[in-house]
Image (cartoon, rainbow, N blue to C red):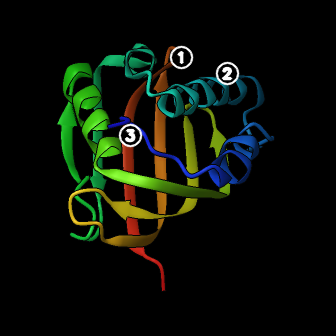
Amino acid sequence: MDPVSFHPDTTERFFKRLEGPANATDGELSAVNMQRLQECFGAIARGDFEAVAALTAEEVEMELSGPPLLPIFGQWKGRHEVNAAARANYAALAEQKAELLAMTAYGDHIVVIGREQGRVRATETAYDVHWSQQFTFRDGLIVRIRGVCAVAV
């Protein structure tokens, strides 16, 4: 089983749009962090979670919350826990069709807002959610990820 299962439309609707300019208000620092975030999402798309881990600080924290429909929520601390959770979370979903709706950057923070459809591998249940993720950077590494999602209505 592939660790990551993105629908082909995700390249056009998410990854290519992620390469575009964010609504950044703190130019140079935001640009560096945006490049790191693009590297992170690119590594996820390749299933290269070692590269993802290399973009996170040793003390990284991740908190994801949302509906019980998706088995990917929780809190994790430290590079090892966060990397293991990311692997498990992407492996739990299939045919992920993500669309980037908006993003903004300010200094050490980037917020990404999207919509995603797919299915839960274990139950074959289809899902359709809106989500936001806030990434906080320090010294070019991700130190915090906070994500929330809600069922699309």
Of the numbered discs 2 and 1, the one sitting upstream in the chain is 2
Name the image quarter holding residue 113. bottom right
The residue that disc 3 covers is 145
| Residue at 37 percent of width and 47 percent of height | 146
Res 140 label: 1
Label 3, secondary structure: give it.
strand
* Amino acid bearing label 3: Ile
* Amino acid bearing label 1: Gly
C-beta proximity under 8 Å, tags 2 and 1? yes
> Left of 140 or right of it: where is 25?
right
Name the image quarter holding residue 19. top right
Of the numbered discs 3 and 1, the one sitting upstream in the chain is 1
Q: In this view, does 69 lie above or below 91?
A: below
* Amino acid bearing label 2: Val
Neighbour tally class for label 3: few under 14, some 14-19, many 20 plus, Cα within 10 Å: many
State the separation of the CA atoms marked 2 and 1.
7 Å
Res 32 label: 2
| Residue at 63 percent of width and 49 percent of height | 8
Picture coordinates of residue 44, whole percent (x, y): 48, 31
Q: Which one is in front, 121 or 102?
A: 121
Res 12 label: none
Label 2, secondary structure: give it.
helix
| Residue at 22 percent of width and 23 percent of height | 78
